[in-house]
Amino acid sequence: MKPIYFSRHGETFWNVANKICGATDIGLTPKGHEQAILLGNMIKEKLDAGEIHIDEIVASPLSRAFDTAKHVADITGLPVRADERLREQNFGKYEGTPRNGEVFRLEKRKFICSYEGGETMLRLAQRIYNLLDELSKDDKIYLIVAHNGIVRCVNSYFFDMTNEEYGDYGIKNCELKEYRFL
């Protein structure tokens, strides 16, 4: 069973302000850069100890994720490339609104809703599932660096989830997750 690793980007200015980033390109805070450096050091230690193996980093092109990936690449020496399919979901009218808003929390459970100008969960799943299918077919082991909305979709690729579990799922900034292709 081939592993694939996932990490969410470091802290952003809108994370601090409790705003939904979505497809809006929001940069890392100084703390976000520090988190990315810590992630890079942790991965390097695991690589050096033979605990994990990674051949390539594939990242979202949005600066918060790509800058996180670049920090990891600089520390580990791993190659990094952007893949447009890892761009965070466009949450339409909800971008820049409070992340913990009750209306948005419930809207995330509507998989065919485009949030007035955004992207449906089903379209997001199509592009993420297609990417994961592609990455599963070669001999390389990848680290994906992307977003909370993307890890929600990645997790659903590997595990059954109810709509409520899907909508509530998330990971911390620069948390490292391991999944395994069957």
Image (cartoon, rainbow, N blue to C red):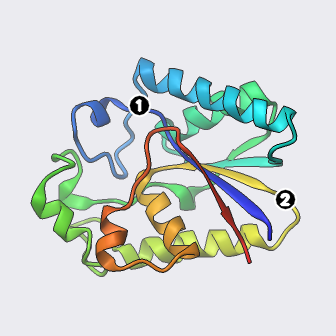
Instruction: Residue under label 1, please give it.
Output: 27
Q: Position of residue 124 (x, y in %)?
A: 44, 70
Q: Nearer the viewer, mark 1 or mark 2?
A: 2
Which residue type carries mark 2? Lys
Residue 16 in view of the camera: yes
Q: Position of residue 155 (x, y in %)?
A: 51, 67
Q: Is residue 168 above or below residue 55?
A: below
Q: Position of residue 168 (x, y in %)?
A: 31, 62
Ranked by sequence position, the earlier of labels 1 and 2 is 1
Classify residue 15 by image quadrant: top left
Which residue type carries mark 1? Gly
Residue at image location 74% in from the left, 67% down from the top: 135
Residue at image location 43% in from the left, 21% down from the top: 31
Classify residue 123 by image quadrant: bottom left
Q: Report the side of 34 relative to 44 (left or right).
A: left
Residue 140: give its label.
Answer: 2
Badge 2: residue crowd in 10 Å (few <14, some 14–19, many ≥20): some
Residue at image location 23% in from the left, 51% down from the top: 95
